Image (spheres, coloured by chain):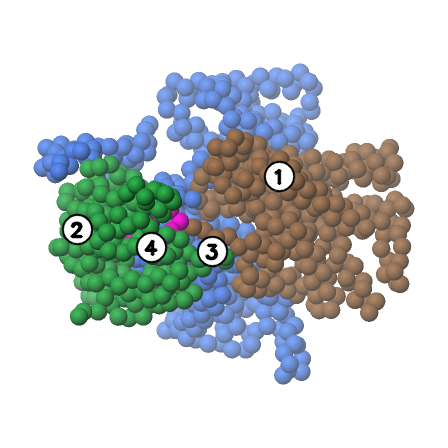
Chain colours: A brown, B blue, C green
Amino acid sequence: MEYFGEQLVNGIIVGGVYALIALGYTLIYGVLQFLNLAHGELYMMGAFFGFFAMVAVGGPSAAVVPTWLMIIIMFLVAMGGGAGLGVAVERFAYRPLRKSRRLAALISALGVSLFLQSAALLLFGARVRLYDTGQFINLRSGFSIGSIRIDITEIMVVVGSLLLMAILWFLVNRTQLGRSMRAVAVDQDAAVMNGIDVDRVITITFALASGLAGAAGVMSGLLLFPVDQYMGIFAGLKGFTAAVVGGIGSIPGAMLGGFIIGIVEAMATGYLNPTYADFIAFLILVLVLLIRPTGILGKKNLAKV
Amino acid sequence: MSENQTGNQPETAGESGRGIGTDEWVAQHEQRLNQASGPFAALGQRWLQLPRGIQWLVPLTIALLIPFLTSNDYILRIGVNLGLFLMLVVGLNLTVGYAGLLDLGFVAFYGFGAYMYAFVASPQFGIHWPTWLAIPMVIAVTALFGLALGTPSRRLSGDYLAIATLFFGQMFLVLAVSSDAVQFPWMQEPVDVTGGANGITNVDPFSFFGFTFSSMTSYYFLLLGLIVIGVFATLRIHNSRHGLAWRAMGEDALAAQHMTIPPVRMKLLAFTVGAAVAGLAGSVFASVQLGVFPSTFKLPLLIMLYAALILGGLGSVPGLVIGAIIMVVLPEVLRFPDYSNWLFFIVLIVAVVTTLKSWKIITAVFVSTLAVGFAANGIFLALGVPYLTTPEWTEGPLAPILGAWVFMPEDRLLYGNIAFVLLVVAIAWMTTRTRRTRLIALPFVLWLAVFTWEVRLLLEPSVTRQLLIGALLIVLMAARPQGLFGKPRVEVL
Amino acid sequence: MTEPALSLRGVTKRFGGLTSLDNFSLDVEPAEIVSVIGPNGAGKTTLFNVITGVYTPDEGRVFLHGEDVTGLPPEKVARQGIARTFQNVRLFLNLTVRENIKAAMFGRTKASLLGSIVGSPLARREEVEKEEQVREALEFFGTRLQGYRLDQPAYSLSYANRRRLEIARAMATGASVLLLDEPAAGMNPAETKEIAQIIRRLRDDRGYTIVVIEHDMHVVEGISDRVIALDHGVQIAAGSFDEVATSPAVIEAYLGKGAAVTK
């Protein structure tokens, strides 16, 4: 029972990270009907940005700022850098393809993914980085439920991702900007004719989505996952799975999907062969796609013939 | 009722051969726009006027002659790789290029075929089927596998199909890598099915009628033969009943359905045939390699296949051949710093010459680039940046020129990285500017590109290759989505 | 008493809370031209979609030449002998005129994939026949889609030519019943007159049974043997053009309550 609890907790925590990545996917797909396959790479870049930010303020051993400030700086840099990168990618790789067929944008996304991975390899080197936050005692403190230990970092990750989702939900459903985004999602041309600056809306969408990915990257690093150029591939796939399972285009769906995938993966790792854990995650995705393509909370699209 | 009222000129002018009617002239407008101008255009025109048969005969003859012109096994190996790659592209073209089905798990069929062959022709299970039995079996089973994959996906389209196939592909990979200790309920011990991450080794080579394929040359000719069949079949399919049905489906699936084309059946057929081709390629691959290794069947290979298809132009058969050649040969060239240097400069020069129409401008650009280079040299020296002298960092005939013009700092990583970032930003910036601004900025950007290349990119060929492929895909889609040889398309969204 | 070419019995189609077709019945005799009119949203295109199998009716049945085709997928219904055009033209834009028409002949031909590749006698024969069919379908439109145009991509055609090609493509399927969804939409008066002539000739010269959705009353008047008026999925009038055009229910549907009084 304890073991189950432990796996469950692990699953929820990792699920929080997946949920953030899923949120980014779902946001972009919701507004543009475009699968940004390069999204995982923005998560990877975020992790790197956060790492370098940490090193820049002196790193774990010689920090010139208090821990809480360092964390904030890391998040800001990662989210800002991620957002900037995402906006640039949209501007130069995807915008020219808005009127082209799906395949073109998908190929471009694959190209961006390859490019970002290689650029990271080139600029940062092949060395795997670790957020060496073990030095910070306060980051590792926490409490225990029975023999399951939960520390502050992990709580921060889950709370943080829930918070970001709430903010995003509020943004999309209760603000003018959100209304513009939803309008663009339904009919871009009509939105233009109603005075909505579609380019700006799309830019903001990408900025938000990529910022979230960046945040996810830092969280992943804080959870002591290794930071390397390839971390975006699998995390991206899983986040993507989560978005589709939860219902692509739906913000609560992305959240739900993220936690589901996280928990399923943790359970599969804990009770079955760890390598099959990936397989199971994919299997779930395929099953969901076949049984209910729009995902758990997704909406059905009725096209007019 | 007169035809003139609808704006159509009477067709008599064109039909009677007295000269092209207005309509026909207008219709050819696009053709004229797309015609290249410049020094290479005349050559291109002459080539296009040759009959199709001759056009294909030329590369075929070259391909036939290569094994006799060189006994270098490495070159033959590249030829074999190209042959395998081309087979895969031909298969993928059916699924994606014709039927428009976004199959992102295609490499799984390749892997499946390879493993199937290895199962029946290696010490893995101790079975050693004769080749004439193994190959048809592999083709049939892979086709079934394709059918199995296609069946649950038959109602999916577009994005969802892409996702589902992507994940099928990943599932296959994970399965292949993890199945080295599979516990079957009826067996005592776990069975090593796929050899796990190490794969299966000591696979039998092909042997027909007593002739064993033991040399690279024999496989080269085998693949050449298969390619000829594949390309020929593709050309025939293009206008055939099924080819048109697939292409119509790719255009407008609902309309096609109303025109008697059964979407499910055609989708499954595309999947199955594509899978069969990939499976065949897989068996050849396994026997050439004398082994099967799961790391081959990952996403990068898939991206390369799609890149080749897109680069060549979807729906164009010469396009997919050329796309494949570029995708396979280019990375090989990049392995050798000297050759890649030459290639880089040739590509750069060709690109500049073909985009800028007038010789005056071209010369001006090149001269300015040289000037920028020398100026930069001076600035670096004035700033006292430590540098390396020529022989250490490049050899070959280009060395003296490069040495005089390109500044090679000692800390290649730092300066190279900065230059790289600046280059990317500069190129992106250029796309937002007018033609004039771009022309002015061009010499600086060109110099920066050469600098980045020499100082940084040459250091790591494998990373550079990925970088270039990624950049190529992005630029290609933005600038010329129909690829090199595709026809410009009209999309209804 | 010949059996109807097309027959609908009590067809009802609902979308969520909206009833698009309500207990709709219709018999179309062979070589008859029936027009379906009604305000937008009346359910006319839904009617076509139900007939061709895009939607399965919640109630009722559809018969084609006496065969029950209810619920069959569109490709099977098409093979039974019915073809349609679309409200917003749906051609295979990047295919040439010739290819558009040949593609539609899929259901009439039998060559296997392998046969096509190696050039079996059957495949070759069918290709010759297909060329013949292309000629036959297009000569119906006079000099419009001829000569060099055959190898031009469909997207290069003018709007009117696109509509004509769509009809030619429908003919190429070998159908005997044609459903034309607003064939004259967006055409100028000359083109409209020509389309009306073509529809009549399709019936007179080639014996097609035709159901037309139209808004242009001149066309409806000029071609119809019978007119059916739909509103909110219900048939509100049926009969000759004059009967339907003067029916109070129809006037009210188009112009609102009270408009009928002055007529």
Magenta-highlighted stretch: main secondary structure? loop
Query: Secondary structure beneath disc 1?
Result: helix
Residue at 57%, 41% in the rendered image: A182
Mark 2 or 4: in front is 4
User: Mark 1 = which residue?
Assistant: A178
Q: Position of residue B316 (x, y in %)?
A: 35, 47
Tag on residue C18?
3
Around disc 3, counting alpha carbons within 10 Å, would you say few (fewer than 14), some (14 to 19), or many (20 or more)?
A: few
Real-space CA distance between mark 1 and mark 3, rounded to the nearest whole angstrom: 29 Å
Q: Position of residue A262 (x, y in %)?
A: 70, 58
Tag on residue C236?
4
Callouts 1 and 3 on one subunit: no
Tag on residue C200?
2
Query: Secondary structure beneath disc 4?
Result: strand
Rendered position, B154 above or below B305: below
Chain on which label 4 sits: C
Rendered position, B383 above or below C199: above
Callouts 4 and 3 on one subunit: yes
Residue B481 counted in the magenta span: no
Mark 2 or 3: in front is 3
Q: Position of residue A27 (x, y in %)?
A: 61, 45
Callouts 2 and 4 on one subunit: yes
Real-space CA distance between mark 2 and mark 3, rounded to the nearest whole angstrom: 35 Å
Query: Secondary structure beneath disc 3?
Result: strand
Residue at 15%, 42% in the rendered image: C143
Mark 4 or 3: in front is 4
